[in-house]
Image (cartoon, rainbow, N blue to C red):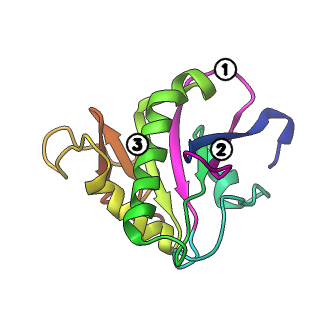
Amino acid sequence: LADEASITRQTFTYKTFDQTTNHLQADVYRSADDKVSPVIIFIHGGALMMGGRGQSTKPGSLFDVLLKAGYAVVSIDYRLAPHVKLPAILEDLQDACKWVHEKGPALFHINPERMYVMGQSAGGYLTQVAGYRVAPRAGAGGPGRVPAGSRAPGAVRRRRGGPRVGHEHGPAR
């Protein structure tokens, strides 16, 4: 990051499993101040079988751009196939979103009404699923739709307690 002293990264456990030592974690990247920020939940790719929450914050990286734009970024882990089936992965996604929405305001100063979800590859698939699996949900489009330019392109937004699927595309490259 251009100014690494102004960015913090904290690791939290968002889900534990009964009678095991297994748990799922999230890395939270945000400005070092206490300002309330919109939040992006980032879901890693890897064909639902590999990968992890660790992401680059080097200048010009996606996380660098998001952080400079004023977002907090929560990069989550989820259980991987073939050790679990898809329903368990979707449950982890739902639990992560619920945790950020409920615990995020106190733990890392986010506005839960300005919550977005985005991901790469398999994480993009899970982002789409968040649009209809994370409850409560709002309808797509129509009145109350997020104004153009007010969110990360291609993100899902929680509005009035439900996720919103983005309809914009980023700048042409």
User: Measuring 30% from the left and 59% from the top, which residue is drawn there?
Assistant: 167
Q: Residues within 10 Å of mark 3 (few under 14, many from 20)?
A: few
Q: The magenta stretch spans which residues?
A: 18-44
Estimate the x, y position of residue 36 in percent, counting from the top left: 56, 24
Q: Secondary structure at mark 1?
A: loop
151 displayed left or right of 9: left
Q: Nearer the viewer, mark 2 or mark 3?
A: 2
User: Mark 2: which secondary structure?
Assistant: helix
Question: Number of callouts in the render?
Answer: 3
**Above or below for 87 versus 11:** below
The quadrant of the rendering that contains the C terminus is bottom right
Label 3 sits on residue: 150
Label 1, on which residue? 34
Q: Is residue 105 magenta?
A: no
Q: Earlier in the sequence, mark 2 or mark 3?
A: 2
Of the image marks 2 and 1, the number of the one nearer the N terminus: 1
User: How far is disc 3 from disc 1 in space, using C-alphas?
Assistant: 22 Å
